[in-house]
Each structure stands twice: as C-alpha cells, then as structure tokens.
C-alpha cells in the first residue's frame, strides 16, 4: 500500500516530510472514498483529525449519501517548521481547500462545507513511513 505514496514523500527528511504533508492534504478525501485502508495506515492511533474524518465518512455513508470534492492544495512549495525535540515533525503550509459536498443517492446536494484559504499544520512521525499524528487548520 505504501507504494501508492510518491517516492519523495517516503524519504525520512525535511523534503520527505514536506512532500508527504502535501500528498496527505491533497489525497485524504480520495483515500477515504477509494482506499480507506491506506488512509488508516497513514493515520496515527491518536490523530483526532483522522478520527473525525473517519467518523464523518461513516455518518454520511449510513444515510446512503456520498461526499464529493474537499481537496486541499498546498499553495507554496515549501513549509515552515521541521524536526521537534520529541522526534516528530511539525510543518505549516498555506492551503486552499475546495468545497466538500454531501449528495444523496439521486445526486442532489444535501450539504456543503465551504472551502477557502488558510494554513494547515501537520504533526508527523516516521515509523517505516510517515504517519499523521495531528492536523490543524486556520482560515486565512
């Protein structure tokens, strides 16, 4: 499964952490829709953000609805941050997110979470591959 991660995003260094953070932000919605096992492999056991994403997708699925959109794009090549004293990596990136749309089985929009610009901060650790410990975001 880890082979699905771009090679640069598998490196255990600042470049790898940055590339993984951009990959995760851009792909986590699609991973939940298409490959939730890979999402689970990348999510830390105590990642509140990751659990919120799982819970949201499960709740929507229970109603027979689906989620569309929600992509998050890093709008700068580099991040702020780096290796912390506890061995985790903290990276902050400017982002732009697309609207996340919930649709029913007829394709009718039921709910919309507005996208926008802001900054995402990810805490990562490396254990044979990058794992998401936490994600936070602030609207810009």
Image: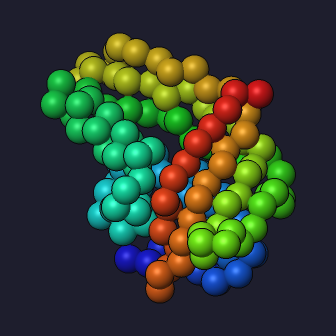
Instruction: State left or right for residue 128 relative to residue 93.
Output: left
Instruction: State left or right for residue 138 relative to residue 25.
Output: right
Task: Please state the total of marks drawn on the protein image.
Answer: 0
Looking at the picture, how far across and down is residue 129, in whole percent?
A: 50, 79
Instruction: State left or right for residue 71 relative to residue 32.
Output: right
Give whichever of 138, 16 is nearer the camera.
138
Quadrant where the C terminus sits is: top right
Q: Residue at x 41, y 46 (%)?
A: 48
Residue 73 seen by the camera: no
Instruction: Give the image quarter of residue 99.
Output: top right
| Image: 76 above or below 113 | below
Looking at the picture, how far across and down is residue 54, in whole percent?
A: 31, 44
Residue ranking furthest to the front: 85
| Image: 102 above or below 24 | above
Q: Residue at x 58, y 42 (%)?
A: 136
Q: Residue at x 38, y 32 (%)?
A: 67
Give whichever of 131, 109 is nearer the camera.
131
Tell me how the rendering is colored: rainbow
| Image: 47 above or below 70 | below
Looking at the picture, how far across and down is residue 49, in whole percent?
A: 44, 44
Q: Residue at x 51, y 53 (%)?
A: 134
Residue 120 seen by the camera: yes
Quadrant where the N terminus sits is: bottom left
Looking at the picture, how far across and down is residue 115, in whole percent?
A: 62, 26
Instruction: Give the image quarter of residue 34.
Output: bottom left
């Amino acid at each position: 499964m880890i082979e699905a991660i771009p090679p640069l995003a598998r490196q255990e260094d600042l470049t790898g952490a940055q590339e993984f953070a951009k990959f995760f932000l851009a792909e986590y919605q699609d991973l939940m829709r298409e490959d939730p096992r890979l999402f689970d492999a990348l999510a830390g056991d105590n990642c509140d953000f990751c659990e919120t994403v799982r819970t949201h997708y499960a709740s929507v699925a229970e109603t027979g609805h689906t989620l569309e959109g929600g992509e998050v794009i890093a709008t700068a090549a580099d991040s702020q941050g780096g290796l912390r004293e506890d061995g985790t990596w903290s990276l902050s990136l400017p982002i732009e997110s697309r609207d996340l749309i919930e649709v029913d089985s007829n394709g009718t929009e039921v709910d919309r979470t507005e996208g926008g610009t802001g900054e995402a901060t990810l805490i990562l650790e490396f254990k044979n591959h990058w794992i998401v410990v936490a994600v936070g975001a602030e609207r810009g």
